[in-house]
Image: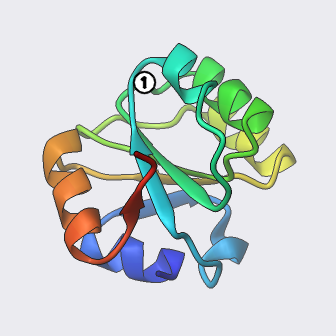
Amino acid sequence: MKIKEVVALLDAKVVAGHAYLESEVEYCFSSDLMSDVLTVETDNLMLLTGLANLQTIRTSEMSDITKIIFVRKKKATDEMIQLAAENDIILIECDYSMFKTSGLLYSAGLKPVY
């Protein structure tokens, strides 16, 4: 699924990484625990999280995750947007709950990690 399709499906807003809207995503992982994110070893992964802070960006960078959706109306700060841009990470803001967002993406064909 293309990132631009994800954005449209979730009625979401891209706040960083607009150049990557044509890129594809195959897997999705939902977590607010960055320690759990560090254990995932899957390529082409999108992270759904309600944890909107710099640690999320840093953890994603360490885990080679370049696609992040912030759920529950969480907003990225300017500092987060800058760090994401420096690391070629796309940031998306979504008003839906993590449960609804996960369900919509799963129904649209994104695969779970496990």
In the figure, is residue 109 to the left or right of 78? Answer: left
Q: Quadrant of the C terminus?
A: top left
Nearest the eye: 4 or 38? 38
Tell me if residue 97 can be seen: no
As drawn, 57 above or below 9:
above
Looking at the rendered structure, the secondary structure element under dot 1 is loop
In the figure, is residue 47 to the left or right of 60? Answer: left
Residue 84's quadrant in the figure?
Answer: top right
Q: Residue at x 18, y 49 (%)?
A: 96
Find the residue positioned furthest to the front: 114
Picture coordinates of residue 95, whole percent (x, y): 22, 49
Q: Residue at x 49, y 60 (%)?
A: 27
> Which residue is identified by label 1?
51
Picture coordinates of residue 110, whole percent (x, y): 38, 69
Q: Residue at x 32, y 76 (%)?
A: 109
Picture coordinates of residue 7, whole percent (x, y): 39, 71
Residue 29's quadrant in the figure?
Answer: top left
Residue 101's quadrant in the figure?
Answer: bottom left
Q: Amino acid at mark 1?
A: Leu
Tell me if residue 113 can be seen: yes
Task: Please say which color scheme the image uses.
Answer: rainbow
Give the number of marks: 1
Crowding near pointer 1: few (<14 within 10 Å), some, many (20+)? many
In the figure, is residue 77 to the left or right of 66? Answer: left
Picture coordinates of residue 69, whole percent (x, y): 44, 49
